[in-house]
Structures are given as structure tokens and as C-alpha cells.
Amino acid sequence: MNAVLGGLASAALAGLLAVSAYSGTALLAAALALVVLVTALGWSALVDLPSPLGSGVLVALAGWAAVAVAAAVQHQPRPLARFAGMLACAVLAAFVREIVRRAPREALVESLTGTFAGEVVVVFGAAWLLVPVTGVGGHGVLVAAAAVAATRLATALPWPGSLTGWIGLAAGTVAALIATALSAPAHLAQGALIGVAVAAVVAALDRLLAHAQATRGTAALVASSAAPVAAAGVVAYAVARLFAV
């Protein structure tokens, strides 16, 4: 049941991104801010961090800052270059937070790396804002979101993970092809490549988080639903930029 709920939640978030992409940058940024918030709310539970409030706050702040930066630089020639600075700041913030954390600072390494992992996921998620400025335009968000939704729904099937992962890969690719054929048939090849890349990342992340989302409560389930949606952003942009500019 958890897997089904998680898959439906992921599909809903992906659908929100797809719809908002046709309504302008501001609404897409707002939808991304929601994805960041949902990820941050349960990230500590998902990866079992010792101080959940501080880690969640850092993940949320990193994600929101990245969304703001992406909105500001989306029309620049190399917008991802700004993300390097964002990640550097995220590392520093995670270190400072561990230094000021009250004793006993148990699981110090796990807390640091777990917090930074969450920051990386949401920072790269801001790349969803960059997809509409590529050659595929807002259709690229729709195509990638369709791949995310189909993959997550397929991986929620009550079958072994070794099987549902491949089913998810196929389902995500097919969904991306259908979305491309309906919205931008001139970019069918690019849509297929976006679908394969996004579906592979989402299926792999789902397999990685499957045990945690099933055993660590509602908060972990919430984060595991949003994290694959966020992680797909930079993949969708990289493929769209490479083949469709």
C-alpha cells in the first residue's frame, strides 16, 4: 500500500509540474518550491538522520535558493554553472550546522552526508525551470513529467524490484513517447531520449529508497515520493539541452 500511495503522490507532483510549465516561470517555480518542501519535510526520516529539524531546514533552504537562482539565470548560456556555487554553499552550510549542533553529536558523518545528499537532490531539481528554455520548450517538462509519473506508478506494482525496475523503465519511455507525439511530434527522438534517461534515474532512485519508504513511516514515504520528481529535473534538462537546442 505504501508503494502505491508513493507512486500516486509522485505522479501528482509530476503532473503539477507539467501543468505549471504551460503557465509561466512563476507558477513552475512555485510548483518546484512545493516539491522541495515535500522532500525536505521527510528527508531526515527517509535517510534516518539524527537531528531531523536542522537537516530538513537546510534541505528546504538549499532547494528554494536553487529555484530562485535557476529562475534568474535560465536564459544565460550556461545556467548550470551557477549550480556549482549553490552546491558549494550547501556543503559549507552542512558543515557549519554540524559544528553548532548540540552535543552529543552522534552519527556526525551520517548526518553530514545525509543532509548534503538531500541538498543535492533539491538543488538539481531546480533544473526543471531550465527545461522550457531549451528547443523543446514547455513540452519538455510535460514529456519528462510523463516519464516520471509512469515510472513511479510501474515501480509501485506488487512484484519484485528486479522486475518492476525494468517495467518502470519501459513504461516511462513509452509515456514520454506518447506525450511527445501528442505535444511536440517534431521532437520525437528527443522525447524518447528524455524518457529513457528520466525513467532510468527514477527507477534507480526508487529501488534505492524502496526499503526506507516502506519501513520508516509517513514522513519517509512523503520524501521518497518527491525526491525522484526533483532528481529528474537535471536529467531532463541535460538531455533536452544536448539534443534540442
Image (cartoon, helix red, strand yellow):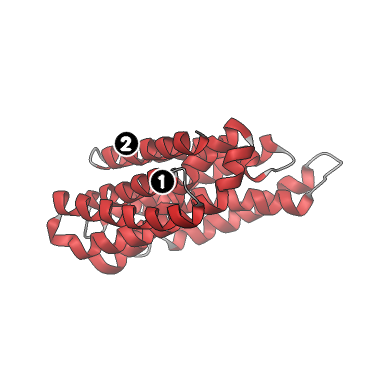
Dividing the picture into quarters, in which one does residue 12 lie? Answer: top left
Counting other residues with Cα less than 10 Å from the Cα at mark 1, is it few (<14), some (14-19), or many (20 or more)?
A: many
Q: Which residue is mark 2?
A: 27
Residue 152 image position (x, y, % from top left): 41, 46
Q: Position of residue 132 (x, y in %)?
A: 27, 51
Q: Residue at 37% of width from left, 39% of height from top?
A: 11
Q: How far across and down, in percent of the image, does residue 148 sit? A: 37, 48
Furthest toward the front, the residue is: 159
Q: Which residue is mark 1?
A: 152
The answer to whether residue 76 of the structure is visible from this angle is no
- Across and down, in percent, residue 144 comes to 31, 52
Image point 34% across, 61% down: which residue? 196
Q: Nearer the viewer, residue 223 or 53?
A: 223
Image-based side of 110 in relation to 69, left or right: right
154 sits left or right of 101 in the view: left
Q: Residue at x 82, y 44 (%)?
A: 105
